[in-house]
Image (cartoon, rainbow, N blue to C red):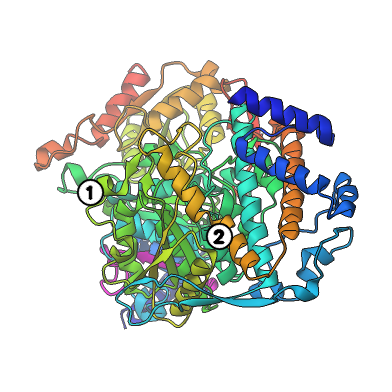
């Protein structure tokens, strides 16, 4: 099977002039589909443009939802994009309304709406975001297997709709904190793929200069990346306290998993957040497994949206980006109106194992994984919706895919070639705004310096 | 009401001492208990910076379990003086999170024994974050409360945490002795942009010390990381922190009658330790005795020994360093047992004489 893959991908490389062949079957399928579209007689011009892919426009997800509607953000209008599509834009639907799954409610009379409006621009933006996270995580998988990334690496593929949907519903001025499966949120909160991958490979160009690694990446209004399961939940409530203290109408989105949901400190936090009406959206990303322990084996009650008891909760389809977005909007409104905290349970799924050292098949079946991939993949679902409703063309999506692939490839290139942090940096950043101090090295004659 | 009565008394005291001092050029000093010094420091810092707030069990309406925060809730209200439920891990995490978002919390532990429930938030969420983020995320927080043995509170309520916290990079650990220390160091801790563990001592709260006029000014701070020589001496250096500085000074007074002059150093800060001050003193006296309330193994005294050995002062030692510590047992309850579990003045005297080979 593997040699077949290698043979076919090598053949494709020779034909298309690509340097690096497909590493996985799914990549191979993408390559093949590109090749098919290249040689299809109906789009001869496309073949020419594919040889020099256009410069990808900035993939920013920090723009608030209102800005996403403006025509400037349409990636196909960006300078350098020379794409010929077989249909004109006049044919495409610019906005559509979709039915979304009704959320289960706890201590709430009404929940989020059961329909969601989506503009073309929004759809392409969400697609772009999710596809970027997907490709970035797959690239991390590849780099880890090549031993270029070491230590912990907890991948987010399958759960993209959660990160994308949440970010679509909040403002950059709101706050977000999550646990260790953090790469997706690091991206949606504004850190470039380049800086994320370089942090994973431990280079000085990484967002934390190589000192943090996979679980410790930060950005303005994004508080990581936290390695201790559940510890981020009180932290998130503290950030919400700061919002309340300052009266700035901001909220804090505090994420945790189904495994963490049984941590005592989370219940302590629920109590205080409710008592003090902190503007905190507690979100449980239920991907059905805490490491290798299924939810049924870990929790006496798997209704995570009800576990807050006196805190209202909603259970949301976490594989549908629109569902996540509408639920998060609802939750944010709830908090901003001074009603106190709210809990969202996002039902989602991770394709990879718990981390790169877990194949992910000893406690669940390959069939289960395959079923989710084929029936509920968040990216496919959005793409299907848009294609079925004539909101975008298949070629557009392909173009975006190619752009993203190139961007991730370039980022990986940087992450592999950037130098490691210099040894002079070893002891810096112990204290902030403090005079330099001496740090003891491994032996008494090794006297190192630490500056803020 | 209590505050204004205190104010009146203070003014009266000032006037009286001012009158007495009419013939001298010494600034007017007052007697202030450690408790009041801490209270004033917090009051002034709360006033100075609106991002500062206090949270902990019983800090607001109860006026503080040990009355250290007396009057603050009446003055500053619910938003800034926050009573928490009994949820150390939860409220410590909340305090750390609020610091990450730009506030400047003072997180009180009723005693540091209870901080063990929250120690993950202190170490993993507070201490390490600035480093892990390579400078992107700072955590300006103070963790304060009584540390070490009290009187008759038995094993679970008597542990000294100086060594535990001082072990960790990313934390500053401070241990004041007298009122001036308490005031100046707490102000510095609150103004510091890093996590500071502030170890008070319950038995010192009610002890009054004279405070100079300078030390009563609103901007009086004592630098973190600098020890103070409380008493000059020539024959032996006594290094201590917190309550045992008193014991050292008392022992020094007794020894002086026998012609032994002790230099007493008040560490003030455990981490970063002011080794230079200790070394300078040892190079003068050639003898070193450390005194602490905590257990001996892996303790503050053990660290001082290791550092002295690694530095230039080793060659000036005429005898090995002696550590005077708490007895290596959980704290018993019965008074006679408790008294014999902690360093007494006679233990220090014996140790000094042994070190000097007298």
Residue at the image position 27 percent from the left and 65 percent from the top: B85
B79 drawn magenta: no
Callouts 2 and 1 in the same chain: no
Q: Is residue A433 visible?
A: no
A232 left or right, relative to A36: left
A86 left or right, relative to A152: right
B2 left or right, relative to A283: left
Residue at the image position 23 percent from the left and 29 percent from the top: B328
| Camera-side residue of B108 and A112 | A112
Q: Looking at the picture, does residue A90 appear above or below residue A140?
A: below
Q: Secondary structure at mark 1?
A: loop
* Residue B70 in picture, x, y percent from top left: 32, 71
Q: Cα distance, mark 2 to mark 1?
A: 64 Å
Residue at the image position 53 percent from the left and 20 percent from the top: B310
| Camera-side residue of B169 and A373 | A373
Magenta residues: mostly which secondary structure? loop
What chain does mark 2 sit on?
Answer: A
Residue designated by label 2: A381
Q: Which quarter shows the N terminus of chain B?
A: bottom left
* Residue B13 in picture, x, y percent from top left: 38, 73
Residue at the image position 61 percent from the left and 26 percent from the top: A147
What chain does mark 1 sit on?
Answer: B
Query: Magenta segment, which residues?
Result: B48-69
Q: Which quarter shows the C terminus of chain B?
A: top left
* Residue B101 in picture, x, y percent from top left: 54, 63
B254 left or right, relative to A151: left
* Residue A335 in picture, x, y percent from top left: 44, 76
Crowding at dot 1, Cα within 10 Å, few <14 / some 14-19 / many 20+, comes out as some
Point out which mark residue A28 bears.
none
B50 drawn magenta: yes
Point out which mark residue B150 bears.
1
């Amino acid at each position: 099977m593997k040699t077949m893959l290698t043979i076919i991908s090598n053949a494709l490389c020779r034909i298309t002039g690509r340097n690096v062949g497909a590493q996985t079957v799914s990549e191979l399928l993408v390559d093949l589909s590109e090749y098919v579209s290249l040689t299809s007689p109906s789009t001869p011009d496309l073949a020419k443009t594919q040889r020099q892919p256009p410069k990808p426009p900035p993939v920013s997800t920090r723009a608030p939802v209102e800005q996403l509607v403006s025509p400037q953000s349409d990636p196909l209008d960006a300078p350098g994009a020379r794409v010929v599509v077989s249909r004109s834009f006049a044919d495409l639907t610019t906005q559509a309304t979709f039915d979304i799954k009704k959320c289960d409610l706890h201590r709430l009379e009404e929940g989020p709406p059961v329909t969601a409006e989506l503009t073309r621009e929004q759809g392409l933006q969400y697609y772009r975001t999710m596809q970027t996270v997907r490709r970035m995580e797959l690239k991390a998988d590849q780099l880890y297997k090549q031993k270029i990334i070491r230590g912990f690496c907890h991948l987010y593929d399958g759960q993209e709709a959660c990160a994308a949907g949440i970010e679509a519903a909040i403002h950059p001025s709101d706050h977000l904190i999550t646990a260790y499966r953090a790469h997706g949120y690091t991206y949606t909160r504004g850190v470039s793929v380049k800086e994320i991958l370089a942090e994973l490979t431990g280079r000085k160009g990484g967002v934390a200069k190589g000192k943090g690694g996979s679980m410790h990446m930060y950005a303005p209004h994004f508080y990581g990346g936290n390695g201790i399961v559940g510890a981020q939940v009180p932290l998130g409530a503290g950030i919400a306290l700061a919002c309340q203290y300052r009266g700035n109408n901001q909220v804090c989105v505090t994420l945790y998993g189904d495994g963490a949901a049984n941590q005592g400190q989370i219940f302590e936090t629920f109590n205080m957040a409710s008592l003090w009406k902190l503007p905190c959206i507690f979100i449980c990303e239920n991907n059905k497994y805490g490491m290798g322990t299924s939810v049924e084996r870990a929790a006496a009650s798997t209704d995570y949206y009800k576990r807050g008891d006196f805190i209202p909760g909603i259970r949301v389809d976490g594989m549908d980006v629109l569902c996540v977005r509408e639920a998060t909007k609802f939750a944010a409104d709830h908090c901003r109106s001074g009603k106190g905290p709210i809990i969202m349970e996002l039902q989602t799924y991770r394709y990879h194992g718990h981390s790169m050292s877990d194949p992910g098949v000893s406690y669940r079946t390959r069939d289960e994984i395959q079923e989710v991939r084929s029936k509920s993949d968040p990216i496919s679902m959005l793409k299907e919706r848009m294609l079925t409703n004539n909101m975008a063309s298949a070629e557009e999506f392909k173009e975006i895919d190619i752009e993203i692939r190139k961007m991730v490839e370039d980022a990986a290139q940087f992450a592999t070639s950037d130098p490691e942090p210099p040894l002079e940096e070893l002891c810096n950043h112990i204290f902030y705004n403090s005079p330099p101090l001496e740090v003891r090295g491994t032996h008494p004659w090794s006297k190192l310096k630490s500056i803020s | 009401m209590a505050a204004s009565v205190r104010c009146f008394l203070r003014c009266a005291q000032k006037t009286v001492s001012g009158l007495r001092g009419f013939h001298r050029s010494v600034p007017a000093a007052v007697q202030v208990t450690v408790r009041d010094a801490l209270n004033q420091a917090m009051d002034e810092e709360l006033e100075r910076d609106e991002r500062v707030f206090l949270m902990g069990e019983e800090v607001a309406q109860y006026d503080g379990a040990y009355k250290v925060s007396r009057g603050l809730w009446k003055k500053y209200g619910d938003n800034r003086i926050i009573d928490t439920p009994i949820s150390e891990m939860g409220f410590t995490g909340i305090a750390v999170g609020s610091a990450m978002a730009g506030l400047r919390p003072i997180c009180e532990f009723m005693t540091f024994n209870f901080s063990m429930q929250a120690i993950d938030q202190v170490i993993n969420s507070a201490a390490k974050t600035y480093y892990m983020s390579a400078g992107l995320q700072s955590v300006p927080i103070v963790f304060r409360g009584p540390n070490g043995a009290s009187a008759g509170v038995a094993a679970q309520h008597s542990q000294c945490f100086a060594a535990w916290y001082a072990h960790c990079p990313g934390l500053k650990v401070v241990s004041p002795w007298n009122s001036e220390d308490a005031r100046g160091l707490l102000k510095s801790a609150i103004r510091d942009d890093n996590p500071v563990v502030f170890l008070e001592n319950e038995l010192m709260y009610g002890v009054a010390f004279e405070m100079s006029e300078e030390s009563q000014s609103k901007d009086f701070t004592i630098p973190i990381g600098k020890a103070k020589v409380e008493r000059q001496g020539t024959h032996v250096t006594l290094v201590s922190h917190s309550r045992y500085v008193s014991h050292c000074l008392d022992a020094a007074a007794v020894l002086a009658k026998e012609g032994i002059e002790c230099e007493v150093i008040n560490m003030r800060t455990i981490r970063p330790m002011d080794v230079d001050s200790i070394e300078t003193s040892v190079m003068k006296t050639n003898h070193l005795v450390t005194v602490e309330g905590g257990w001996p193994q892996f303790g503050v005294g053990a660290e001082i020994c290791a550092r002295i050995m690694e530095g230039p002062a080793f060659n000036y030692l005429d005898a090995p360093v002696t550590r005077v510590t708490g007895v290596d047992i959980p704290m018993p309850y019965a008074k006679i047992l408790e008294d014999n579990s902690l360093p007494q003045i006679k233990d220090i005297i014996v140790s000094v004489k042994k070190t000097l080979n007298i």
